[in-house]
Amino acid sequence: MAIKFNTKVLSLLLVLIVTFSLLLVQSQCHTKYQEEQEEEEEKTAEESLFECFVTCSRHRQNDHELTDCEQRCVKQYQETKKQEGQEGSRRHGGGGGEGTVENHHREDEPAAQRFKQCQSRCGKQEQGQQRQYCQQKCQWEYEKQKREEEQQHGGGRGGGDPTNAKKESKEEEKQQRQNPYFFDSQRFDSKYRTEQGHIKILERFSKNSDLLQGIENYRLAILEANPNTFVLPHHCDAESVFLVVGGRGTISYVWEKQRKSYNLKSGGVLWVPAGSIVYLTNNDDNERLYILKLLQPVNTPGKFKEYFGVGGENPESFYSSFSNEILEAAFNTQSEKLQRLFGQQSKGVIIKASKEQIRALSQESESSPRGRREKESSSWGPIDLLNERPVFSNEFGQYFEASPNHYQQLRDLDVSVLLVNITKGAMVAPYYNSKSTRLVFVVGGSGYFEMACPHLANAKGKHGSQGRKERQGEIITDVHYQKVSARLSVGDAFVVPAGHPIAIVASQDSNLQLAGFGIKASHNQKYFLAGQENIWNEVQSEAKELAFRVPAREVEEIFRSQEQSYFMPGPGQKGKGQRHVASILDFVGF
């Protein structure tokens, strides 16, 4: 019995010792984890951003990879700043990264002054593409510093209370994450990439929200090509509209047994029919070529493919799918020669070309259509959008649009093409489109938009008080709106559905330049809700008095107090600002 008792005691003691050891190890691990976390938290977001930039520069293989890498750095930085909030921003003081273009400034210098100094250093120390990267980093750092200044001063909306500013900042970030109409630059996926450029495609609109099912059969893409490069011939199962937003090049396509070639620069618009063989060159020795593309697939809604007859390893030629017997019979040529023909290309979709080749391709472009169908063909040529008279223009901005009402090239697709320049610190007056949904891409500068959406409010109301019918005596209400907003920077995209009131504001330091397309654009009307040309001017006084339940003269006094139309000074801007009307003509992009 004693032996059995001692055995039980020893077993119990052994269990207790093992349990205590495990708890001790776990406690030590947890303590070590906490120490590591605290050590990691001591590093500011700015220091992490700098280290990330350094890593990009060490591992980059070409200019394009540097751009993608730095964009990931900025994305990570923005997410970190969101988590830090206002308190962390004040605690760290925006320091770190001494010696970089972002962070060797005195903390008491205004953000605008730092931005100018940073841009000046870029101009003195860097050249070519490196200067563009340097200027991009200046822009990112400026936007970060500006947000911190706004938070410390209440952002003009928090009444100077940092607590209110912090709450507003978090609410704004939450709204942006829940905004189904906004797509930041990271939502563009690289479909083709080489050392000489890339083609990026924005994810399907309906993937972001069911509210965008109406534009499911449209896709947005951006092509970027280095100087003196050539994009291989291919055809696509989608109708396309090209809009040059930076640089200059020659676009050629073969349609109805005719080759059409056009030299285009910024603001150039060209319709490329589905199935036509298309190829293009960047004719410039220094500047990159940027083309924004709208695609409407003709086979599967929302999905399209490019088909390359040329190729080998990269890209693969579709001729390789056929048997040798078929190819030999089709070309009346032995398979050995065919294998050589369709197996040489391995440098990708965008390749380098000699200046002689570029010159030859650009010189063969057509200044005017030729042939017996000259009159008909002339209506299908390119559009020089910036050479047209602006639809709306004043000292605070310009709006250019090519409409299917006036251009046959855009009529079958029922698409319009637009360019917008908002002078720094200014805004587009609140407005809505009567029937056209707009797909907008940020080409230059920064800013933000605010839009009223009834769909999100009503969807939210299914599980809450909003959006439901509530009887209040004899009154039944079912009208609710939710503000959706987002901060805009280069490479972002957003959707403006028909009927949705929206206002767009440029940042205080730079013009906000936008490019985009209008879907279902025929006979669309843009109705402004404020300014001298606002739609309420056409409503009868008695109707306004009944609608607003205040005297008509008071309604009219308020709606006519803004002296400007279309574009006007933005929030916090006094006076008439700075004139910069010609800036849209330098629409270089990126």
Image: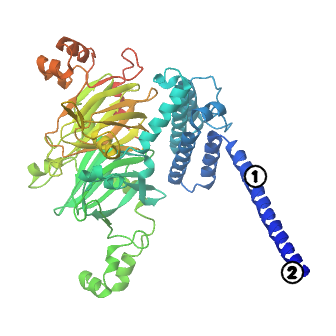
| The C terminus sits in image quarter | top left
Circle 1 is placed at which residue position? 31
Residue positioned 15% across, 20% down in the render:
546
Q: Quadrant of residue 586?
A: top left
Nearer to the camera, 10 or 361: 10
User: Looking at the image, can residue 47 be seen?
Assistant: yes
Circles 2 and 1, Cβ within 8 Å, touching? The answer is no
Q: Name the residue furthest bottom.
A: 325
Is 233 located above or below residue 404 in the figure? below
| The N terminus sits in image quarter | bottom right
Nearer to the camera, 218 or 322: 218
Q: Amino acid at mark 1?
A: Thr
* Residue 240 image point, x, y percent: 25, 54
Q: CA distance from mark 2 to mark 1?
A: 41 Å
Is 108 located above or below residue 69 in the figure? above
User: Dot 1, how many residues are within 10 Å of its Cα: few (below 14), some (14-19), or many (20+)?
Assistant: few
Residue positioned 13% across, 21% down in the render:
543
In the shown orientation, is residue 40 left or right of residue 399?
right
* Residue 364 image point, x, y percent: 27, 53
First-in-chain label (2 vs 1):
2
* Residue 461, disc: none
Label tally: 2
In the shown orientation, is residue 405 left or right of residue 425?
left
Q: Quadrant of residue 307?
A: bottom left
* Residue 4, disc: 2
Q: Name the residue furthest right.
A: 2
Is 254 located above or below residue 104 in the figure? below
